[in-house]
Image (cartoon, rainbow, N blue to C red):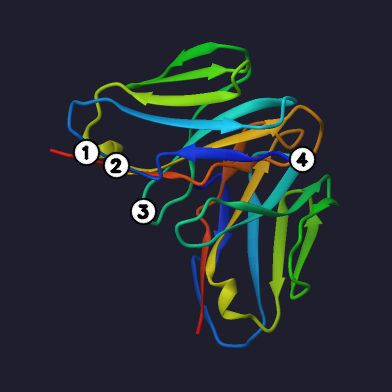
Amino acid sequence: NTKITQSPRYLILGRANKSLECEQHLGHNAMYWYKQSAEKPPELMFLYNLKQLIRNETVPSRFIPECPDSSKLLLHISAVDPEDSAVYFCASSHGTANSDYTFGSGTRLLVI
Amino acid sequence: GEQVEQRPPHLSVREGDSAVITCTYTDPNSYYFFWYKQEPGASLQLLMKVFSSTEINEGQGFTVLLNKKDKRLSLNLTAAHPGDSAAYFCAVGASSSFSKLVFGQGTSLSVVP
């Protein structure tokens, strides 16, 4: 999926700090971070629209999002916990939260 | 808030048989309905979105039925083949701006030859 790219694809961490990156080439205004734990559905973490943080679900404070411009989204993680092991998907949509979503390929985070 | 229940959690069918996955939701303001397919280790692929009431939508090899009166959304794979083996998720959203999309718990479908 070259329309919305995420890096890295795989990440193995001890109690370190790392940032996940996402960039969309679709001209969408809204961008999201979702967390998908094993055998679970995706759950919304953060929603940005036009670089403004619109929704911040109940997420531990060690997760800090950043939207440097409307096509890029970052997720800074500090002092990860084993419960953070999951796939983190970036998504984007043209307008409001329930327009067509395009999901990125995900970053698979394993905390050891 | 919205709650979405998806059944069954696991489904195994023979090649050529039909497979039906159903979601029920609680919020009467729900307006957007989606079905996603997720193959192992892959991202979510949009199969279909529906907006209208009691609508039947046909895709390639599947039919989606939405009954807003009963708050029920279903996906019917009409003649399943092994390539349909994947996890399937329904997702529901309200019409208000920036309301979040709520996903069902998923159905793991296995199509055996």
In the displayed structure, B110 sits above or below B95; it is below
Secondary structure of the residue carrying tag 4 is: loop
Estimate the x, y position of residue A10 in percent, counting from the top left: 48, 70
Q: Chain of mark 3?
A: B
Mark 2 highlights which residue? B85
Secondary structure of the residue carrying tag 2 is: loop
| Quadrant of the image occupied by residue B112 | top left
For badge 4, the amino acid type reads Asn
In the displayed structure, B96 sits above or below A8; it is above
Q: Chain of mark 4?
A: A
Q: Residue at x 70, y 66 (%)?
A: A75
In the displayed structure, A18 sits above or below B91; it is below
Evaluate if marks 1 and 2 touch, with contact meaning CB atoms under 8 Å apart: yes
Estimate the x, y position of residue B68 in percent, counting from the top left: 62, 18
Q: Residue at x 18, y 26 (%)?
A: B16
Secondary structure of the residue carrying tag 1 is: helix
Q: Are discs 3 and 2 both within one chain?
A: yes
